């Protein structure tokens, strides 16, 4: 039993490492912006088509840019830049006309993605429409088979280990042999997936490479243990460690707030399913060989709680990955969950029959065999499931027929009091023109920077609601008969989740103008010698960067991303690195005079929202971006304490931590 406890402790440690793996590592790559934008009309031809993603990507087959007649206008091979976040499709010198582009990439979690856009060079009539179609991203049969082998091999090998440790050691040598063969099958599936994705540098590729190494070591260790008939317990450790691989390579990645819930549910689901499936395989071996007449009863006692845990953890994962119940039948991912659930119910029914046949080994063996057939089909459903995009990503990527982003939103009306917040992936701003009635104008920007059309928007002041009418792209307006409001809200509804953002009026209404104070604060900031602040920047809820900024007069800047890269700018020289220990890459840049205030230069509609003896909070808008700001300042020094910026795909919170303190911004050490 001492060896059993040691092996189990090692397993718990390895699974804990899986749960604590960085959450951002396995999310799908989402498009932040494209240049040119889809439907754009350009006065001058672009040198390239670029697509910016929020995660690293690899180039996939199928990238193309063609003229309206279908001839290619690319001048070279596609490439990636900016730490593999930007796909570049280089172009020849274009003449006036319509052009279509198709981009194809492999995301960091190994999923193939594709999209199209169209643009025009020169003047024209109706917006251009792409003549290309996005590549088919449906997983191939071979891809599903490879995932079936990869996952199924891990489940049988890990489950065989758990059976030997928890149920019966009577046929431990046979269990070691079957686990070794299962690891070989799993490694073969991982190797095929690596070949299919052709991106070993991605996080998905790293996990698969590690899985191949661990599976190979485990297969060798188990084969040796089988041949000598000893050290079987420790030889199972690699098989148990691989139970973390599906979580690391799969969809179980969420923001920090619920990462532990998602990853814990997924690891639990895999481990318990492995005990069920691999345990049944070993139970069949025991029944055939007659090695342990009581193994069936012991396994049955553990199988019931295992089935309950499988169902509960599977339901938890479905809740995480789906945004609504309707996605169970409206998305391929949801339909795969339904198929998996049906097969699970059938397997549970057969398992119930198996419990009734415990006293008859021949009948029990038939039930176990049938159960294994159903579970093999269930693993096939899991293989399909892992190859599909989760339902939450289907909505997140904007696959909502009623919503469009085709043009810039109009600037907010002048003389308004402005508020802004993030609502899922959207930037939502509210401009309130004082008077009676109040004139409320909401602006909703998508990830592209364009206004979002087709929303059902309801505006309210102090609970008095009014449906808004369109006032331009991404613009919605309403009037409410109220003179002195205390709060506002903007409710958005499309074919996705309802989003409501609320704004409080912290002081007297209407807020007094604050242009003079902000101009003074701007002058104070520019006169500083050094500034240090910490920034939290996200493009949408599941993509966040935490960065420390240092700036020093007259032209020095340094940033360090937590768990990521860094950059240094001194005069016209720049150095960047993609990871904390990575090499510095030099480049040239424009000179950036410092300190420069991070709240823009073309601000207007500055209003003082709140005043205390020591602090003052103001809001304003920079329509040139467009971006909305809310900041709190020290009244005595006019230095900012904290600031929030809301813009398209840029939701930023800054906390200023140092003024005129010594900072060291020097060139990185030269390469040896």
Image (cartoon, grey):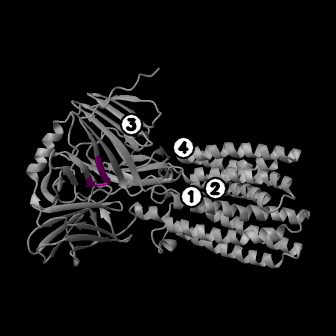
Sequence order check: which comes first, mark 4 or mark 3? 4
Q: CA distance from mark 4 to mark 2?
A: 16 Å
Sequence order check: which comes first, mark 1 or mark 4? 4
The residue shown at (60%, 62%) is: 384
**Residue 422 placement (x, y as % from top left):** 31, 60
* Residue 185 visible to the viewer: no
Please tell me in which quadrant of the rendered image residue 498 appears.
bottom left
Q: Secondary structure at mark 3?
A: strand
Q: CA distance from mark 4 to mark 3?
A: 24 Å
**Residue 106 placement (x, y as % from top left):** 50, 49
Look at mark 4 in the image and give the residue it sits on.
199
* Residue 617's disc number: none
- The residue range painted magenta reads 644-655
The residue shown at (33%, 67%) is: 403
Look at mark 2 in the image and give the residue it sits on.
147
**Residue 186 placement (x, y as % from top left):** 69, 51
Look at mark 3 in the image and give the residue it sits on.
566
Viewer-side label of 3, 1: 3
């Amino acid at each position: 039993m001492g060896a059993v406890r040691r092996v189990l402790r090692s397993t718990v440690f390895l699974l804990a490492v899986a749960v604590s793996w960085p959450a951002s590592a396995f999310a799908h790559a989402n498009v932040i912006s494209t240049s040119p934008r889809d439907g754009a009309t350009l006065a001058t031809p672009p040198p390239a088509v670029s697509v910016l993603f929020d995660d690293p990507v690899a180039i996939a087959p199928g990238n193309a840019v063609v003229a309206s007649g279908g001839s290619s206008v690319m001048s070279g091979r596609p490439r990636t830049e900016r730490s593999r976040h930007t796909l570049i499709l280089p172009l020849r010198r274009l003449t006036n006309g319509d052009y279509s582009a198709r981009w194809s990439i492999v995301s960091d979690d190994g999923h193939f993605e594709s999209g199209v856009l169209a643009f025009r060079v020169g003047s024209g009539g109706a917006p251009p429409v792409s003549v290309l179609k996005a590549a088919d991203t449906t997983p191939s049969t071979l891809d599903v088979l490879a995932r079936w082998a990869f996952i199924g091999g891990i489940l049988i090998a890990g489950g065989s280990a758990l059976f030997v440790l928890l149920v019966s050691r009577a046929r431990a040598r046979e269990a070691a042999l079957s686990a070794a063969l299962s690891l070989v099958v799993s490694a073969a599936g991982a190797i095929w997936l690596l070949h299919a994705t052709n991106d070993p540098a991605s996080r998905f590729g790293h996990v698969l490479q590690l899985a191949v190494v661990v599976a190979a070591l485990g297969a060798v260790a188990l084969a040796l243990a089988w041949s000598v008939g000893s050290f079987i317990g420790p030889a199972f450790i690699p098989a148990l460690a691989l139970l973390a691989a599906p979580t690391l390579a799969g969809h179980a990645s969420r923001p920090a707030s619920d990462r532990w819930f998602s990853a814990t549910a997924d690891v639990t689901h895999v481990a318990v399913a492995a005990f069920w499936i691999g345990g049944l395989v070993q139970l069949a071996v025991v029944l055939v060989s007659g090695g342990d007449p009581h193994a069936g009863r012991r396994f049955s006692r553990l199988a019931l709680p295992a089935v309950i845990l499988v169902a509960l953890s599977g339901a938890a994962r479905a809740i995480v990955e789906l945004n609504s119940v309707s996605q169970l039948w409206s998305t391929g991912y949801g339909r795969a969950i339904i198929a998996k659930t049906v097969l699970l119910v059938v397997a549970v029914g057969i398992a119930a029959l198996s419990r009734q046949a415990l006293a008859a080994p021949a009948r029990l063996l038939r039930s176990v065999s049938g159960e294994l057939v159903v579970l093999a089909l269930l693993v096939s459903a899991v293989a399909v499931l892992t190859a599909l995009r989760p339902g939450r990503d289907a909505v997140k990527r904007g696959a909502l027929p009623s919503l469009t982003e085709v043009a810039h939103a109009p600037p907010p009306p002048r003389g308004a009091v402005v508020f802004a917040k993030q609502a899922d992936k959207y930037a939502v701003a509210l401009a309130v023109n004082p008077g009676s009635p109040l004139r409320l104008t909401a602006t909703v920007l998508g990830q592209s920077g364009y206004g979002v059309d087709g929303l059902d928007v309801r505006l309210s002041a102090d609970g008095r609601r009014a449906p808004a009418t369109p006032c331009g792209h991404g613009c919605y307006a309403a009037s409410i008969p109220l003179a002195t409001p205390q709060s506002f809200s903007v409710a958005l509804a499309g074919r996705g989740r309802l989003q409501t953002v609320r704004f409080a009026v912290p002081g007297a209404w209407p807020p007094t103008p604050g242009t003079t104070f902000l101009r003074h604060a701007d002058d104070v900031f520019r006169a500083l010698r050094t500034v240090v602040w910490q920034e939290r920047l996200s493009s949408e809820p599941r993509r966040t960067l935490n960065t420390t900024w240092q700036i020093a007069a007259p032209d020095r800047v340094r940033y360090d991303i937590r768990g990521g890269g860094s950059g240094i700018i001194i005069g016209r020289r720049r150095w960047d690195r993609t990871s904390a220990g990575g090499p510095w890459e030099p480049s040239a840049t424009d000179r950036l005079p410092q300190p420069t205030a991070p709240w823009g230069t073309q601000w207007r509609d500055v209003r003082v929202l709140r005043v205390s003896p020591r602090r003052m909070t103001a809001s304003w808008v920079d329509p040139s971006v467009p971006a909305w700001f809310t900041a709190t300042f020290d009244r005595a020094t006019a230095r900012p304490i904290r600031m929030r910026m809301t813009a398209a795909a840029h939701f930023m919170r800054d906390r200023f931590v140092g003024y005129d303190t010594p900072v060291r911004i020097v060139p990185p050490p030269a390469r040896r």
